[in-house]
Image: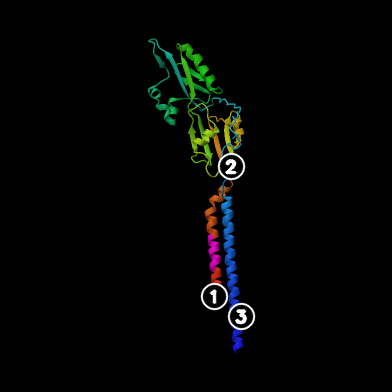
Amino acid sequence: MKSGRIVYLFYRFGHQKIKGNIMCRHIIQSFQLSFIVIGIIIFSSCTTQYKLAYLNNLDVSGGAETFPMEIPEYKIQHRDILYITIKAMTADGSINDFLSSDARSSGTYVQSEAGQYIHGYDVGSDGTILLPVLGKLEVAGSTLDEAREIIQGLADQHFNNSTVDCKFLSFKFTVIGEVRTPGTYINYNNYLTVLEAVGRAGGVNEFGRRDKILIIRSVSDGTKTYTLNLQDKAILSSEAYFLLPNDVVIVEPESKKIFNLNLPIFSFILSATTSLLTTTLLLINYFGN
């Protein structure tokens, strides 16, 4: 009887030891799986310095590089708003702006979009603008310089030694997608580059692709699109490097954005699964005793 009891105790001890080893092995395997998944998540969410830089292939040896640039000439279109002044000398020798008003002369008309619309000269659906004294003038399809020459020719017929100035008040551009401050902006310069436009929008954010920027441009016969790579110096010679009024800039997202957005869900599922597996193995071991 004693020998049988001893055999049973050895069997029981060995059985419990085997079960404990199996449980430990399962727990270790579950933690190993967790670490592997966490490592994959961390690795896939990393961003290299190369992806964050602009114009990566510029010569860094100190030598100067020259890039041919062809600035596109914008043709005035329907719904554009122009700033126009006609200055000439009066009989008493003073110089007046014959198109000025109190609001225009105070400069308040450039401080808001509504003021620009009220005090600027908008191009109608027939392609004309209406100016005091000069009447209707067709400017659609002309560049700013050509429009200025048209107005100058008529102004010379009514005023002595007149000087005409013509500028855009409606040079709007839109930047959307993966930038820090997307929106529609107004440019008060004659020229604007795509790098300046992205900079106005706060720059490309951590999910944006600098190598895939889409430019949408309205042209007379439809819409034209360009794809630019801000990491390639070739954009400096691109037709779309200089933006035109009403251009839309779209910064494409990185493929990892969806993964990063769902990362909290993945982490929760992984944590819950690991906790459930550990708890289950502990319960099995407890009730098996």
The residues colored magenta run 271-279
Instruction: Tell me which label, 2 or 1, sits earlier in the chain.
Output: 2
Instruction: Tell me which label, 2 or 3, sits earlier in the chain.
Output: 3
Q: Nearer the viewer, residue 168 or 48?
A: 48
Q: Please say whether residue 238 is one of the residues in the magenta stretch.
A: no
Q: Which residue is mark 1?
A: 287
> In the structure shown, which secondary structural element does the residue marked by tag 1 occupy?
helix
Q: Which residue is mark 3?
A: 11
Give the spatial CA distance, label 2 vs label 3.
63 Å
State whether the magenta stretch is mostly helix, strand or loop: helix
Label 1: how many residues lie within 10 Å, few (<14), some (14-19) or many (20+)?
Answer: few
Residue type, numbered disc 3: Tyr
Do the CB atoms of the residues marked 2 and 3 lie less than 8 Å apart? Answer: no
Q: Nearer the viewer, residue 155 or 245?
A: 245
Q: Please say whether residue 274 is one of the residues in the magenta stretch.
A: yes
Do the CB atoms of the residues marked 1 and 3 lie less than 8 Å apart? Answer: no
Mark toward the viewer: 2 or 1: 2
Q: Quadrant of the N terminus?
A: bottom right
